[in-house]
Image (cartoon, rainbow, N blue to C red):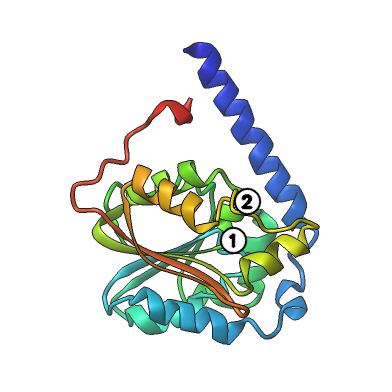
Amino acid sequence: MREKVFRKVFSDMDRVQRVQEFFAGRAAGWEVRFPDDGPSYARAVVDLAVQRGDTAIDVGCGTARAFVPLRTAVGPDGVVLGFDVTPEMIAEAVCLDRARLGGLVVADGFRLPLADASVDAVFTAGFLSHAAPHRGLQELARVTRPGGRLCVFHPVSRRALAARHGKVATNEDPLAPAQLERDFLATGWLSELWEDGEDRYLALAVRGECAESGKDERDV
């Protein structure tokens, strides 16, 4: 068991390092390279059906582009928090004045500094593409109250996203419908909608009332 724990720790360190190395040098001017994504983010937040007064989080928030529609949705009495493992991305979000809309935290999405069942709505754009989806969804389930909602989003299609990384989208991809549905069910999420159009990727799910987010053999 100790060997498995050490293997998991070092695996996480490698994963975090890879993500940070990929995004650190790209953080400055990130939104300049993708200037037309704003409306797509706003539309996805509408689909998430965030309510006024909710606690909404953006995991893998990057430059916190979703903060504007999230703050509008939760209103002045709600809470908006963004988490990203790359300090340079959080710094860019601060430069873009996103901190006035919500809290920005450098944190690993696999170990969120939040209490169990403390969140009403989870928005994530790209997080699961750079993580082990099962473990990522498990942590999101842990912090989300029963009945809380999840939006897995990207402002381009799964095919276009794969092409950006020099790959071809297949049915074995983590975000492929069958794969994501399997991980949803295994981690306490009930699938509600899946869309993979030319202009965006979107999957919506609801936290099961009696679902368990406990560990299984894939966590060690």
| Distance of label 1 from label 2 (alpha carbons) | 7 Å
The residue singled out by tag 1 in the image is 126
- Rendered view: 12 above or below 53: above
Q: In the image, residue 134 lies at what x, y percent?
A: 47, 43
* Left/right of residue 100 with respect to residue 38 in the rendered view: left
Give the amino acid at mark 2: His
10 Å crowding of disc 2: few (<14), some (14-19), many (20+): some
Quickly name the residue at label 2. Answer: 130
Residue 84 seen in the figure: no
Residue occupying the point 42% across, 53% down: 181
Could you tell whether 72 is left or right of 18 in the image? left
User: Can you say whether 138 is above or below 100 in the image?
Assistant: above
Residue drawn at point x = 28 percent, y = 62 percent? 148
Camera-nearest residue between 44 and 162: 162
Which quarter of the picture shows residue 132? top right
150 in relation to 10, above or below: below
Q: Look at label 1 and name its amino acid.
A: Gly
